[in-house]
Amino acid sequence: MIERRKTRLVKVGDVKIGGNAPISIQSMTKTDTRDVAGTIRQIKRLERAGCDIVRVAVPDMEAARAIEAIKKKINIPLVADIHFQHSLALEAIKSGADKIRLNPGNIRRKEDIADVIRLAKKKKIPIRIGVNSGSVPNVIARREAPKQSQNRDCFASLAMTRAALAYIKLFEDLDFRDIIISLKASDVVTTIDAYREMSGKCDYPFHLGVTAAGPLDKGIIKSSIGIGTLLSEGIGDTIRVSLTGSPEDEVASGKEILRALGLKKGGIDIISCPTCGRCEVDLIKIVDILTKRLLTIECEASRRGHRLLAQPLKVAIMGCVVNGPGEAEEADIGIAAGKKCGLLFKKGKPERKVSEKDFVTVLLREITRLKD
């Protein structure tokens, strides 16, 4: 088991972060927050996908005030993402936001920060100190970076940690400690270095993510390496996979990262071979159909407030006789394919032959039986 970094506990609505609470999954709406109906629809889809906390952009007062109407129609905590104007944070708090994110790179006046902290304390909501490498003032990097080093990534990670520590001091001076920290860069190594550096300097919970990770394929790889590396070291309490794509994909990716590390229970782990010239069934198509069908079923279960499976289930779909029987035997349910057919295994024991055209139907039926 992964031994997690010890942190204080912070509550966002009814979701606990840090203090050994389960690692939560976050996403951010891609809608215009002022479009209340559209934003609510997207958040509802995120709820069905298994999102624990959602964030919305607050570019102006209209967006800040829209939070009140949005909150009335959703079931997960809502975070207001604030930049440039502290007055937007004040309005968002008054409108019922469950948490505020402030960026040390563009909200820097002590008086403004103090105003937000005082109101957050009064409303008993936490604040995320959300540092991004792209918005950390260059002057901090020049002042704090080691003179002998010419490594720009070192400059960036050090600048982020210094910016966060300076902000934390302002909060602590006002006796405010309901804080969550994020230190995000688009560069994976910079992100990892920043969180590692900060992990020994405070006991606040961390929100992990690789910012601007890119489109689905590249973004999942970068996020999995960055977030996964830190989680494997026990660093991290809530995560957001930042993708140029649908927020539902962010949630699905976050779930898989947690499952791969054994940090999220339940769900289905599909084991399937990459295929080669020995494969005599259309395995790629079969796995694609099965994955989509299972996602639909899982989302429907989540919509009803249930998990598809309380315990993890390993399903193996293997394309040939080299590794197929062994992988299928080790899975809860498995099919080792031959020529246009396959042998069904359950709990390590061979059951019967299955035609290629029935692979998906049979596997879904067996999964449903275990669920029930």
Image (cartoon, rainbow, N blue to C red):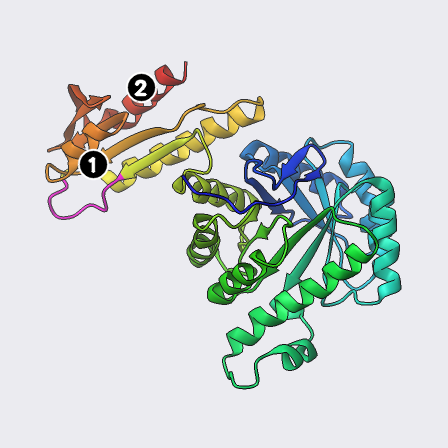
* Residue visible at 46% across and 43% down in the picture: 3
Quarter of the image containing the C terminus? Answer: top left
- Asked whether residue 61 is in view, the answer is no
Q: What residue type is labelled 1?
A: Met
Taking the magenta stretch, the answer to whether it contains residue 216 is no
First-in-chain label (1 vs 2): 1
Q: Can you tell which mark lies on residue 318?
A: 1
- Rendering coords of residue 61 (x, y %): 86, 53
How busy is the neighbourhood of tag 1: few (under 14 within 10 Å), some, or many (20 plus)? many
Q: How far apart are marks 1 and 2 (CA)?
A: 17 Å
Task: Indicate the secondary structure of the residue bearing disc 2.
Answer: helix
Magenta residues (range): 272-279
- Rendering coords of residue 139 (x, y %): 69, 80
Quarter of the image containing the N terminus? Answer: top left
Taking the magenta stretch, the answer to whether it contains residue 273 is yes
* Residue visible at 46% across and 26% down in the picture: 297
Q: Name the residue under label 2.
A: 366
Q: In this view, does 142 lie above or below 211?
A: below
- Rendering coords of residue 48 (x, y %): 57, 32
